[in-house]
Amino acid sequence: MGSGPTVGSDRPSLLASDASPVPERIPVTDIALQRRLTERFSTQLLTAVSARHDTTEIIVGPGELVSVMSALHDDAEFRFELLADLAGVDTGVVLQVVYHLWSPLSPDWLRVICDGLPRDDPRLPSVTFLWNGAEWAEREAYDMFGLIFEGNRDLRRIYMPPDYQSFPLRKDFLMPDDASRSPGQGVRPIEVAFQTAESGRVPLMRVSPGTGSLAGWTRPGEVGAGDPDSGGQVGP
Amino acid sequence: MEVTPPGTPEADAGTGTAVLDAPVPTGASPIIVPNTQWLSADQTAYNGGKPPTITHLAELELEEKGDNGRWGMLDVVPTTADYLLDYLRMNSLWPLLSGLACCAMEMMSAATSVNDMDRFNMFPFRASPRQADVLIVAGTLSTKMAGPLIRLWEQMPEPKWCVAMGDCTCSGGRYKRSYATVQGIDRVMPVDVYVPGCPPRPEGLIYGMLKLQQLILERRGQWADRRVGPTVPAGV
Amino acid sequence: MTGEPRVRSLDDPSIMVDSPATIIDAVPPYPPRTEREAEFYSLKDGEMFVNLGPQHPSTHGVLRVVIKIDGEQVVDLDPVLGYLHRGVEKICENGDWHHAISNCDPLEYIASMFSEAMPVLVAEKLLDLEVPRRADYIRVLAWELNRISSHALFIGWLALDLGGITPILYGFIERDEIVEMLAALTGQKLLFNYLRIGGVNGDLNHEFLSRLGDWMSRAGKRIEESSKLMNENEIFVGRTRGLGVLTREAALRTCVTGPPLRATGIPYDVRRAHPYSVYPELEFDIPTRTEGDSYARYLLHLDEIRESIRIIDQVLHQMPDGPVMAKLPRLLRVPPGRAWVAFESPRGQYGAYGISDGSDQPFRFRIHDPSYFTLQAVGQLVPGHLVADTMAIMASLDPIMGGIDK
Amino acid sequence: MSVVSRPWSRLSLAGKIILPLIAVFVALNLVIVLGWVSGILPWLVQAILDALGDNVGILRFLIAATIILVITVPVAFMNIFFEMKLIAFVNLRVGPNRIGPWGTLASVVHGLKVLAKEDFTPTGADVPAFTLAPAVVYLAAVMTLLVVPFAPGLYGYDMDIGLLYFFAVGGVGVVGLMMAGWSSYNKYSLLGGLRAAASLISYELPLILSVMGIVMITGTLNLNQIVTAQEGSFLDWFLFRQPLGALIFFIAATAEASRTPFDLTEADSEIVAGFATEYSGMRFGFFFFAEYVNMFILSAMTAVLFLGGWNAPFDIDPLLSAVGITTPVSVAFDPASLGVGLLWLVLLAPALIIGLLTAVIWMLKSSWSIVVSLVVAFLLFNVIVVGALVTFAAIDLEWVIGLFWFIGKTVALILFFVLMRATLPRVRIDQLMGFAWKWLVPAALLNIFVTAGAIVILDQMGKTL
C-alpha cells in the first residue's frame, strides 16, 4: 500500500481523457476563507487548511473543538450558522467526528474534522450549546460508534435497542455473510461484540480495500498509513 | 436481573447537574439492561415455550388433534354454517392501518382512487387491532419493531390473517444481510399469503388479497394451525 | 396483557399502565440513563403518559412518540426512533458504489429519486466526473416531478391528520399519475433505480413524454382545484394558522432545513445556496413565508409545486441532445479522498459524506436526512398544545421514517 | 367441569349456537305437552289473554318497542351503505360493488361478519361496565325512536311529553360512552370517553334551547301535534318560521351524533378509535350501529320538527281531483258477491296473465328459452300486482304516502350528514366547546326572545304565528 495519498491533494480526473468533450470543471474554492481560517486558527489546527471541490477543510483535536466551533459560529467574519451535518468516522485506527458547516458569507462548505479519538474511550465535547439540533446527530454517533459527547444532555442509543451492546458502524463490527440465523429463532441480532484495544483478542478489521474475502483483512496495528483518513497523525 | 452499569445516574448519583459534566455512560462499558424488545407482553405467546392462549384452538393444539373431529356429533350443520360464516369473512376483510416502510405507500395506493380495494369490501382500514381482520405487513421488519408487531398480531381477534407484502417481509429482501432486520416475518409470526416484489404494485397486493379470499373459503371453517415458520397453505 | 395492576380510580391516572391496544408500555422498564430521560419519565400529579406508536394511524410510519399530557394538553414529549433502522450505511460500506444506489433507494420512499442521488453525486465528485448535460437535465426533470408528487402527498396527509379524508385521495391521484409516468421512464414505480454514476439509466422515451405532456396540460388547474378544498375551509385554516410557530433562531439552532426553514423567512435552498447540476441555468424563485406556522408550511408547499412546474417547463424547452451516460470502466475504482455533497429534497437538504480508499467500495458512506433534524423541532413546538395538535404539527413537518431511521 | 367444558370448547361458534337451541326446543315441547295434559296451559293462556285484554296500552307499547328494536338494524345497514357509496363517490372511487346488486349487501356482510368475530375482554377491564356499555348506548339510541311519528297513526308511543322524553333518553347515551371509555382500561378510550361526555353534554343545551321556539308556537311537547301544526304547503314548515332554530338544531344534532366535523370521540388520527378502541366483535358492532341509528334518529327529528314530518311539501289532492280521483278512495267491493267467480279470479287470473306475458316475451326475445321467459313473466306479473297495490294504498291510505314523504326527508338529511363527513376536517376540542358556549347558546336564547316577542306582537294584532 505504501503511504496513503494526502487528502488535500487535488488529483486530476482519472477520466479526463475519455470522459466527455466538456473541459474539466475548475474546482471552486474560497481562497479568502482559507486565509481567514489560517490567520484565525493557525495555532489550533492539526494540519494546514486544505480545500477540494467546493469544500474547505480544517482538522482540529478534541481539545480545541469548543473554541474553534464557537468562533466559527459567532465571529462576524465567519458566521457559520447552519450545521449541515455531523458524522462519525471510524478510520480503523482512530475515530473521527466530521462537521459540515454553511455560512452565507462563503460559497464553500466548511468541513471541520475532529481527529484522533482513541477507540477504547473516545470522548469529545458536544456542540449542542451552539446547535441543539446536533443532539440527535450526536446520539446517532454514540449509537453507531460509541463516541461520548460530553455535555449532551440525552446521550442514549437512538436506533438500536437499549440493551444492544456493540457499535455497528465500527470497522471491527463484521457483517455476517450468512443470514440463516435470525431473531425469529430467539437469536439476538448477529454481531461481533465490541472489543476494546487492551482486551485480548484484536478482531480483524478492514482498513484497506477489501472485496469480502480474507485477502483484504488485516490487523489494525499493521497498517494505518494505508488509509487516507489517519493520514499519519493519530491524536493531537 | 437489572444490572446498573457504572456511569449511569444511579451509580454515581449526585454528581454535578451542570450541562457540561452531565453523567454520561462510557463507551467501553456498554449499557446492559434487561431485554425488553423480544419479550412480548404475553409471555405464553409464540416464543414463550408454552402453548398459545390467544386462539380458542389452544386446547386442541395441546392435544395435538389439529382440526380433526372438533365438531363431535354436530358435524354437518356447523360445517355448513362455518361455510356461510367464511363466505361473510371472505367478503369483509378489514385490514389493520399499519405500514412499516416503503410498501406501505403501495398499500395506501391500493386503497385509493386509482385501484380501489373498497370494491372487494377490503375497507375500511381499522386503526385499532381489536377490529381488524387482516394484518398487511408492508415493509422491512427491523428487530426493534418485531416485538411490537408480534403484539399487534396477538391483539387481533380470531379469525385473523396475515399478508406479507414485499420482499423484505417475505425473505429479508435487499436488507437480508443487515444487522438490524428480520429475514422474513415468517420467522416471528405466521403468514398466510406472501406477496413478493420490491415493492409489489397495488394490483399485486389486490391479487394477494383475492388469493386470501380463496384461501379463507377453501379452509371451510378450519383455520390453519398458527405455527411460526414458512407455511404455504395448500390449494393456493 | 398480563400482570398489569388494576386501577379503579381516576385520582391518579398516571399509574394506569397502557392497555394492550397500545402495543408498548410508555414507561421503559429500565432505570433512566441520562438526566433528560430521568426528567421526562418523572410525573407530576395530574400528568400521565400516552404512547403513540410505533403503530399509530398518524405517525407516518413507525415513529413512536411518548407524550406526557395533563388533561388534553401536552406537557412534554419524547420521540423514540429506530423502529425502521435497516443499517443502510453499513450495507453501503459492504457493497460497491453501484450497490449503494439501490441500497439508498428506499430511504425516502416518497421521493426515491433524491435518496438514490446521494451515492451518485458523491462518486461523481470523487471522480471529478463531468456528467453529460442531457443527463443533468433529465435528472432535474425527474427530481422536480418527484418533488411535486411528494408535496401532493404532504398536503393530503396534513388534511388526513386533521380529519379530512378526501384530500389524501386527491393527492394520491396526482402522485399515482406522476409515479406511473416515472415508471414509464425508469421501469419501477416506487423505488426507481434510475440514476447512475455518470448519468442516468436510460434516455427519455415516448410513453414518458406523452404521459408528461398529458399531465402538464392540466397540472396547474388540478393543483388549484385540490388546494381549493382546503384553502377556503374555515375549519382547516382555524386549526393550522398560528399552530406550531417556529422562529428563525430556533430553526437555525435546530438545523432545520427545507420548507420548515423557508416558512420562517430564511431563503435557504441548496439549489441556490450551493448550485449543483444545471439549476444555475434555470429560472425559479425560492418561495418563503414569514409566519413559520403550519399554515405557512402548507402554503409554502403549494408555492413550491408551482415553482417545480415552472422548472419542468423550462427543462422541457432547453433539453439538449447528446449522450446520457459518461464512459466509465466496468469495475469502478473511486480514487481516495473525501467528498460532501448536498442537494435539495422535498424535505430539505439531503447530504452525503463519502470516503473512498481507492477500492470499489465506499470506505464510509454517511447519509444525512433532513427530516431526521426536522423532527427534533417537534420537541420544541408541541408542548403547550393539545393532543390533536400534535398530529397537525408533526404532519406539517412532513417526516419520513425511512430516511430518519436509515 | 372439564367433562362439560372440553366438548363445549370443541364446538365451533355455530355449534355453540345450535346445540343450546336444540335443547331449548326439546324442553319447550315437554312443557307444552305436560301443560296441556295437566290442563294448566289452557287456564294459563286464558288468564294471559284476559290480562292483555284489560290493558291493551302496555301490549301495544311492548309490540311497538319490539318492532322498533328490530327495524333499527336494517336502518343502520342502509345508512352504512349510503355512507360507503357516497364517500366513494366524493373520493372519485367506485365503492363496494361485489356483494349484492351494486354492492347493496356490503354493509350487511360487514355487520354479520362483526357478529362472528372473537369477543374479547382485555385484562384489567371493568367487566360489568365493559359489557354493559354497548347495550346502554344502543338502547338509548333505540328508545328515542319510540316517540318519533313516522306517519299519521304510525308511531311507537304517543306521549304528551314526547320532545322532553326524546332529549331525556337521548342524553343517556353519554353514560354508555363514559362507561366504555373508563372500563376499557386504555388511555385512548379514557380520552375518547371524556371528550364524548364534554361535547355531548355541552351540545345538549343549544339542542334543547333551539326547539323552545317551536314549543312556544305550538304550545305542546307532543310530536304528533307539532307535526300537525305544520300541515299545508311547505311554507308552513317551521324551517321558515324558525330558520335560526333550525340551523342551531342541525349543528347541535351533528355534534350529538358525533359526526364529522365534531367526531372527536373516535378521532382516528388522534386517539386510535376513541372509546371503542378495546372493543371487538359484536360489542364494537353495537357502537358501530348506534352511531348510524343516531344519525337516522336525528335526521328524523330534524324532519319532524322543522321539515313538516309526514306532511307533503304541497297538497296533492287538487292534482288527484283534477285527474278525477277523490281521496280517500272508497272501495265498495264485496268479494263475496263474486261467488264462485272469486275462485276463478284467484286461481286462473294469475296463471292466465303469466301465460300471456310468457308468450309475448318468448316471441319478442327468441334468444330466451321458454323457461326463462316464464320466470321473467312471473316476476313481471308480481311487479305489476305489487305496484298496483302500492299505488292503491298510497292513494287510499294516508299513512303510506306520509311514510313516503317522511323517509324521503330523512334520507335527504342523512345524505347531507354523509356529505359533510366526506368533505370537512375535524375541529379541535377547545374550538368545539367554544363554538357551543360562545355562539350556539346565545343564538338559541336570542331565537327564544325573538319568537316570544313575535308571538306577543302578533297576538296584539289578533293573528298567530
Image (cartoon, grey):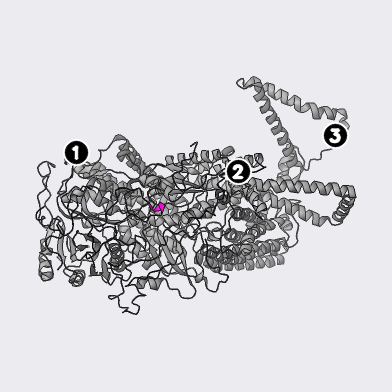
In this rendered view, identify the residue nearer to me: D378 or B121: B121
Q: Is residue D458 above or below residue A214?
A: below
Magenta range: A171-189
Quadrant of residue C182 within the rendered picture: top left
The percent position of residue D284, horizontal first and vertical second, equals: 59, 55
Residue that mark 3 sits on: D335
Give yes or no for residue A186 being in the magenta stretch: yes
Looking at this view, is C257 or A12 the one in front? Answer: A12
Amino acid type indicated by mark 2: Leu
Q: Let me know if marks 3 and 2 both belong to one chain.
A: no
Image quarter (top left, top right, bottom left or bottom right) of the C terminus of chain C: bottom left
Chief secondary structure of the magenta span? loop
Judge from the rendering whether residue B67 lies leftward or rightward of residue C63; answer left or right. Answer: right
Q: Are marks 2 and 1 in one subunit?
A: no
Q: Sort mark 2 into few (<14), some (14-19) or many (20+) by Cα contacts within 10 Å.
A: many
Determine whether the residue tagged by mark 2 lies in a helix, strand or loop: helix
The residue that disc 2 covers is B85
- Return the residue found at the far front: A200
* Residue C323 marker: 1
Q: Nearer the viewer, mark 3 or mark 1?
A: 1
**Is A39 placed above or below D122 here?**
below
> Is the residue marked by circle 1 packed among few (<14), some (14-19), or many (20+) residues within 10 Å?
some
Helix, strand or loop at disc 3? Answer: helix
Q: Is residue C350 magenta?
A: no
